[in-house]
Structures are given as structure tokens and as C-alpha cells.
């Protein structure tokens, strides 16, 4: 192979882009004003010109800035999907600009970050092209990292269970445990009467416990450079709680391994990590019991929760039935019957109406 | 009086390159960082005479010539409609509409559709109705940023002027009372919380202090009191309120880190410096404000009175009674006029006019740019 490594990166990306300007779609509803569409057309034109021009990045940034302003207008729920698509196009043009002419390692990391911003804030365009591009970029990064670490046979470190005190749970209050119950047993005795239950043995076969044992090293190698949303602060009802964006590497360094000595808690919470990083999805399986829920399988939301000890989700209820699969570490869970809702003083505000105003504290050595 | 523009210019709304080819739009200098005098449109329309007023959107600019024969002319994206409108007395331009006020009517042109006629018209019948027109205010209501174009307003409000933000509105009444309504999630309504208001609600914190003008950015509001004090509230994400902004400091820190990484510093060093940065923050215990939900008095410059204020989406520009122009907020496109692309969370004087010995008399902001009118100082300052 005589092509330089970086040139082959651009040829791989070019290969999944439309072959020419005419076949590059830019269709929007009239929610997107003509002036913005004009800007998008200029960017598209630049993409298919051979010219090495500094304006590629500039035009992409204009599209990102104007769509960012629209994404911050009105409530997130009501933001028109068209503007999220515009944002994704901005990300696409920026990635092209970064990868086109001898990108450095930093350029590639910035391109991965840009794809992630598009996946997090944008809406899928051109057959989810950002997802396909980030795959190409990640392969490049992993290959480079492998070459660097060839002499370094680091052992896969299992995350040690913390030696800590656990609350002792009174037998009569404990959530019952069943080993691999039949679908019928689970449905009749637990799902329909809305009784919580712990299912044991049901996820032992997951690759996350076997072939691709989930460790910090494994997560880093798979997704270290990917950007994820992190909640900072003890709980989302606190005044100083906030959300930020970090790479998985930064999150692990600062909040799991605590390398900075930062005192606050950081939680990768309720994030559709498996959509962002499809390779991780292959390590888990949907429990058969999910088919018993209302609605079809497309209504199953899969979220990931990854954090250090000491993260707290305040007492709340969810609109959907949940399966919580604990893969690494342990979690203490307190449940109350929906009949006790009034005694749990839900917040009045629209934003927190599913959350109790009662702060629960659990002493680690106490009996509950 | 001469008008100068600086900031976002991708559509040529400040100035156009002489040799701009038809398809190569990148030939326009996208970021005009140095205040540039607006040309007298020698190349295009017949609009002559001095520019009295300017209105600007993200992609376009409208100039009003009101001396002998009033006329409006356009620059930037919207010129595809026409480059001039004779007899026009006022203009209001957004990305969706161009609204023009004539002595006998108000009309709106839809910028999405390339039609030969305006998409909305309102007749002006009487002299008193004519004085009700102060765009976007029109008799009985106002024209909005996007469809539906017309919204009615209660006559009890006695609306004198109206400013429209991305998701809120701020109104000044004939008696100097400020009303706000719309989304409140960024504190832009000034009622002390983040709830939205469907109907105009008086800003109680300003009660008893008559205001003389109001202006609105994307997510922030400003007003000037009769005594020349400036009040600000809303989102301070880029320092547009002139109050300490965490978002600004973080970006500046990241930019410093990026340049040190490029210089060859290892990842280990970079993480140490970010740790130091955090510790420094904790030491100084600086109070950052990201949302200001109540009006706050902003000290623009020591012992000065504010005459005029205008806002872009995330920046603010103010003219003092002695003719200085101060700007602050988002600066990525050069819209602050300090000949850099830095954003600022503290008001800073635009030195260009001082250097040129000019006194600034008016300022109008487009979404990402700023236009200032200035006259030559008659007496040199000592």
C-alpha cells in the first residue's frame, strides 16, 4: 500500500459520501429559512471542490452556530427536527473539513467529538451518516492505539468490589428473588399485579460477563474518545447539580478513578450509550421478559448508567416498566408502592412532578 | 453622520468584495473585525442621501434614507426581493419576513417564497394610526419574527416600543413601564423565576423607575432608565449581560489548553493544568452568573449615562451620552468591534471611534453584527 495512512482515512470517508454535489440531498421544510439553506448549499459546493480552502471550516461553523441558536430556542421537546438535521449537516461539514487534508491525531479526536455532538444533539441525516463516519474514525484510533500498546501486555483489571458496609435489609421487607422464572410465572405473579422482583441467573450468559468482560480497560479501548453527557452533583434535585459533556476517558479519570481529586460526584446517567456505541450493544441481550410489556419491541428504551460509588437517584417514578440489570458493582434500591404516592410528597413543579421531595438517607451499617 | 459595520458578513450585508464572482460567495470576508464604513451603494440602487436608520437580521441589512424622498434599501441575502423601496419610512427585517412601513400601509414580504407581491398588508387610514407604527409595533398589535406574522396587543398597554427576542418579547409603554412575555427558561422575562408567561406581565422590580427604551437579544433583555442607567437580565452564557460568565472562562481555558497541547505537552501535563485551573477557581471563589432572573443594574463605564442600547443574539452594544460605544458578549464573528474574535463578559469601549476622533450617536445590532453611526468630533478632547 503506497497511500499514506491519513489519505486512506479520507478515501474511506469519501466512499460513504454521495459521489457528487447533485446526489447530496439538502431538503428541508420551510421551518428552515432560505438564507440558512443558502449557507448549506455553499458548504456542499465547497465539499466537492478540490480547493484547499480555509472557508470549509468557517462555513461549517456558521451552520453549527445558527442551528445551535435554534436548538436553544423554545423547549427541547418542541425544537423542530429540521433544525436538529441542520445541526447534523453542520457536524458533517466540519468533520469533512477536519479529515480532508492530512489530519493530525488531534484533528481526528476533534472529528470524533463532532460526530458525537451531532449524534447527541442532531437528528439522523443521510442514513445516519455520522454514525458510519465515527465508526471509521474509531477504527483508525483503535488501530493506532493498538500499535502503540503492542509491547504493553496490560492485564485486564477487574473492577474490585469496594470493601464497604452494606445496609442490612430486613427479610420481611426484602424484594423477593427468583431464579429464571418462567414467562408465565413472572407475568402472572409479578408484572400484572405490579410487584417488584429480582430475577437471578437471567443475564449470566451476557458477553458482558464472559467474552467481553466489562472492565475499565475494555470500556476505554472501545469508547475512550467518545463524548458522553455526565451529570455532576450528588442528585438532580440539588441546586448545584449540572450536566456537562466529557469523553469516556475524561469521565473515568475524573469521576471513577478520581485522578483530579475532585470532590463532586459525576454520573453517566440515563444515556442511550448503546445507540451511540453499537459495539457495546452486542455485549448485552434483551431479557425475554421484555416481550410481556405493552406495546411492541420498538418501544423498549435501553439506557446505560455508569458511575462511582455514592451516586444517588432521588426517589421518583418512571412512566415505563423497568428492568435494571446490574453488571458491575452494586446498588441499593428502595421502592414504595404507588398507593403511597401522597405520603411521598411529589414536587409541584412540572419539571419534577415525578420526583419525591423526601430525601432518603441510608446509613451503611443500618438495618432497613 | 457615517455608519460603520463590523461582525458577520457572509452575505455581504456589511461590505462586498469588489471582485466577488457570482458563485464564489466565500469571497466575502465572513468576519469583519475592524469597523468598516458602509458604502453609499454606488454599485446598485438609486437610493441616495444619508442613511438615517438601520435594521439588521442574521443575513440582511435594511437602510432607511429619510431626507428628501424616503426610501429603504437592502443589503445581504434579502436583496433578491428588490434592492430599494421608494416611499418607505420604516423597515423591520427577520429571516422570515421583510416588513415595510409606508405612509398609507404596512406590508410584509415573505422571504421564503419568491413572490411578486407582499404576503400581508395592513392599511393605515388615519394620522393617529400612522403614529402607532413603530416597527415591529403596528396599529392594534405587532409583526412577529416568524409566521403567523400578525399578533394583536391590548390597547390598554399603550405600547410605545417593542423588542422581540428568540422566544420572548419586551414592551415599553407610554408611561415608561416594561412588560415581558414568552419563554422564561433563561430568565429573560425578569420576573425572578424561570416560568413562561403567555400574557404581558409588568416587570415589578422596575416599578417606580420610568424606562426610556428597551432592547432584546436572543435570550436577554436590556432597558435604559430616564436617568441613563442600564438594566440587564436573562442569559449570560457568553457574557452578554456584562456579568462574570463561567461559559466564557471555560472556553478561554480550553483554548489555552489546546494551544499548549499543540505545542507538544503530553496528556498528563494537560490534565494537571486543568486540575490547577479548578483549584484556582475554588481559591478565588468567583461568583459566576449564567442566568439573571431579576433586572440588574450594569455599570457600563464609570459615571456615564447610557443613551442608546441594542442587542444581537448574544452580544450587547451601548452608546453613552458623551459618544462612546461599549460592547460586550459573544465575539466569535468580530461583532464586538475590538478587532479580535474574543468574547467579553465586561463592557469594553470600542477604541476605533476614539482613535478616529469620532463621536458615536447611534447603534443597531444585527444577529451577529453591529452597526454604529458616528460624527466627527468638533472639539478635540483634551
Image (spheres, rainbow, N blue to C red):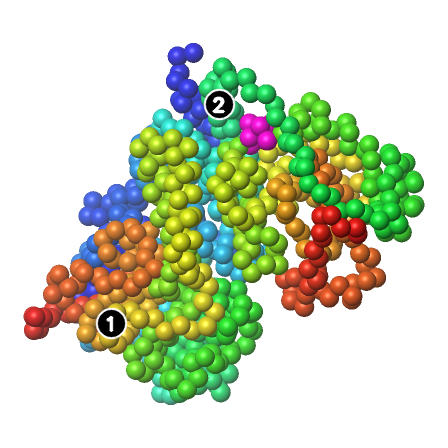
Image point 64% across, 28% down: which residue?
A: A158
Residue A19 within the segment the image draws in magenta = no
Q: Which residue is mark 2?
A: A145
Q: Is residue A145 above or below residue B253?
A: above
Image quarter of residue A20: top left
Q: B258 or A107: nearer the eye? A: B258
Image quarter of residue B288: bottom left
- Same subunit, labels 2 and 1: the answer reads no
- Would residue B129 be found to the left or right of residue B47 on screen? right
Image point 42% across, 48% down: which residue?
A: B279
Would you say residue B106 is visible in this rendering? no
Q: A212 or B367: nearer the eye? A: A212
Would you say residue B347 is visible in this rendering? yes
Q: Which residue is mark 1?
A: B302
> Which SS class for mark 2?
helix
Q: Is residue B205 above or below residue B315?
A: below
Q: B144 or B342: nearer the eye? A: B342
The image position of residue B298, as x and y in percent, is 34, 71
Position of the N terminus of chain B, as image quadrant, is bottom left
- Would residue A242 be found to the left or right of residue B312 on screen? right
Neighbourhood count class around disc 1 (C-alpha, 10 Å): few under 14, some 14–19, many 20 upward: few
Q: Report the chain holding disc 2.
A: A
Q: Report the chain holding disc 1.
A: B
Residue extent of the magenta highlight? A216-223
Outermost residue toward the front in this view: A365
The image position of residue B46, as x and y in percent, is 21, 63
Amino acid at each position: 500500500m503506497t497511500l499514506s495512512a491519513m489519505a486512506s482515512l479520507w478515501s474511506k470517508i469519501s466512499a460513504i459520501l454521495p459521489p457528487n454535489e447533485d446526489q447530496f440531498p439538502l431538503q428541508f421544510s420551510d421551518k428552515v429559512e432560505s438564507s440558512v439553506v443558502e449557507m448549506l448549499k455553499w458548504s456542499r459546493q465547497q465539499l466537492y471542490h478540490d480547493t484547499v480552502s480555509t472557508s470549509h471550516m468557517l462555513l461549517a461553523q456558521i451552520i453549527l452556530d445558527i442551528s445551535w441558536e435554534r436548538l436553544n430556542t423554545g423547549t427541547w421537546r418542541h425544537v423542530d427536527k429540521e433544525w436538529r438535521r441542520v445541526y447534523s449537516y453542520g457536524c458533517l461539514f466540519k468533520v469533512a473539513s477536519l479529515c480532508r487534508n492530512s489530519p493530525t491525531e488531534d484533528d481526528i479526536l476533534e472529528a470524533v467529538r463532532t460526530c458525537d455532538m451531532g449524534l447527541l444533539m442532531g437528528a439522523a441525516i443521510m442514513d445516519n451518516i455520522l454514525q458510519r463516519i465515527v465508526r471509521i474514525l474509531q477504527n483508525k484510533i483503535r488501530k493506532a492505539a493498538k500499535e502503540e500498546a503492542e509491547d504493553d501486555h496490560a492485564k485486564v483489571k477487574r473492577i474490585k468490589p469496594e470493601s464497604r458496609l452494606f445496609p442490612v435489609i430486613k427479610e420481611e421487607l426484602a424484594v423477593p428473588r427468583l431464579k429464571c422464572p418462567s414467562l408465565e410465572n413472572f407475568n402472572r405473579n409479578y408484572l400484572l399485579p405490579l410487584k417488584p422482583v429480582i430475577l437471578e441467573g437471567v443475564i449470566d450468559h451476557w458477553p458482558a460477563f464472559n467474552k467481553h468482560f466489562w472492565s475499565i480497560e475494555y470500556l476505554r479501548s472501545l469508547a475512550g474518545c467518545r463524548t458522553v453527557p455526565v451529570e455532576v452533583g450528588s442528585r438532580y434535585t440539588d441546586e448545584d447539580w449540572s450536566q456537562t459533556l466529557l469523553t469516556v476517558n475524561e469521565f473515568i479519570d475524573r469521576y471513577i478513578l478520581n485522578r483530579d481529586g475532585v470532590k463532586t460526584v459525576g454520573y453517566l446517567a440515563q444515556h442511550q450509550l448503546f445507540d451511540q456505541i453499537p459495539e457495546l450493544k452486542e455485549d448485552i441481550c434483551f431479557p425475554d421478559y421484555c416481550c410481556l410489556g405493552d406495546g411492541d419491541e420498538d418501544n423498549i428504551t435501553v439506557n446505560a448508567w455508569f458511575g462511582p460509588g455514592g451516586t444517588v437517584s432521588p426517589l421518583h417514578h418512571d412512566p415505563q416498566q423497568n428492568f435494571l440489570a446490574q453488571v458491575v458493582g452494586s446498588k441499593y434500591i428502595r421502592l414504595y408502592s404507588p398507593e403511597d404516592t401522597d405520603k411521598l410528597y411529589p414536587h409541584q413543579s412540572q419539571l419534577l412532578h415525578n420526583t419525591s421531595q423526601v430525601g432518603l438517607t441510608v446509613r451503611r451499617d443500618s438495618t432497613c | 453622520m457615517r455608519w460603520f459595520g463590523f461582525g458577520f458578513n457572509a452575505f455581504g450585508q456589511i461590505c462586498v468584495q469588489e471582485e466577488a464572482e457570482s458563485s464564489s460567495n466565500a469571497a466575502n470576508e465572513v468576519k469583519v473585525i475592524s469597523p468598516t464604513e458602509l458604502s453609499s451603494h454606488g454599485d446598485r440602487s438609486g437610493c441616495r442621501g444619508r442613511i438615517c436608520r438601520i435594521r439588521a437580521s442574521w443575513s440582511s441589512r435594511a437602510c432607511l434614507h429619510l431626507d428628501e424622498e424616503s426610501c429603504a434599501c437592502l443589503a445581504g441575502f434579502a436583496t433578491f426581493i428588490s434592492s430599494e423601496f421608494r416611499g418607505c419610512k420604516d423597515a423591520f427585517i427577520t429571516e422570515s419576513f421583510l416588513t415595510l412601513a409606508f405612509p398609507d400601509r404596512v406590508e410584509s414580504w415573505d422571504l421564503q417564497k419568491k413572490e411578486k407581491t407582499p404576503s400581508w398588508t395592513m392599511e393605515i387610514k388615519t394620522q393617529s394610526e400612522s403614529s402607532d407604527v413603530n416597527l415591529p409595533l403596528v396599529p392594534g398589535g405587532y409583526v412577529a419574527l416568524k409566521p403567523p406574522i400578525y399578533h394583536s396587543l391590548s390597547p390598554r398597554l399603550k405600547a410605545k416600543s417593542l423588542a422581540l427576542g428568540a422566544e420572548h418579547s419586551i414592551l415599553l409603554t407610554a408611561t415608561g413601564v416594561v412588560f415581558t412575555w414568552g419563554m422564561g427558561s433563561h430568565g429573560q422575562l425578569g420576573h425572578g423565576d424561570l416560568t413562561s408567561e403567555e400574557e404581558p406581565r409588568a416587570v415589578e422590580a422596575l416599578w417606580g423607575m420610568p424606562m426610556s427604551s428597551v432592547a432584546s437579544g436572543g435570550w436577554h433583555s436590556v432597558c435604559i432608565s430616564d436617568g441613563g442607567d442600564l438594566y440587564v437580565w436573562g442569559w449570560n452564557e457568553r457574557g452578554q449581560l456584562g456579568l462574570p460568565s463561567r461559559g466564557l472562562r471555560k472556553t478561554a481555558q480550553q483554548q489555552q489548553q489546546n494551544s499548549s497541547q499543540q505545542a507538544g505537552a503530553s496528556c498528563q501535563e494537560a490534565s494537571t493544568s486543568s486540575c490547577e485551573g479548578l483549584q484556582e477557581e475554588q481559591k478565588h471563589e468567583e461568583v459566576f452568573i449564567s442566568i439573571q432572573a431579576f433586572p440588574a443594574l450594569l455599570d457600563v463605564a464609570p459615571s456615564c449615562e447610557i443613551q442608546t442600547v441594542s442587542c444581537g443574539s448574544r452580544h450587547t452594544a451601548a452608546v453613552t451620552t458623551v459618544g462612546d460605544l461599549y460592547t460586550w458578549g459573544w465575539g466569535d464573528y468580530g461583532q464586538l468591534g475590538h478587532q479580535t474574535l474574543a468574547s467579553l463578559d465586561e463592557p469594553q469601549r470600542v477604541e476605533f471611534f476614539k482613535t478616529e476622533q469620532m463621536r458615536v450617536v447611534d447603534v443597531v445590532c444585527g444577529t451577529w453584527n453591529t452597526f454604529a453611526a458616528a460624527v466627527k468630533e468638533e472639539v478635540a478632547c483634551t
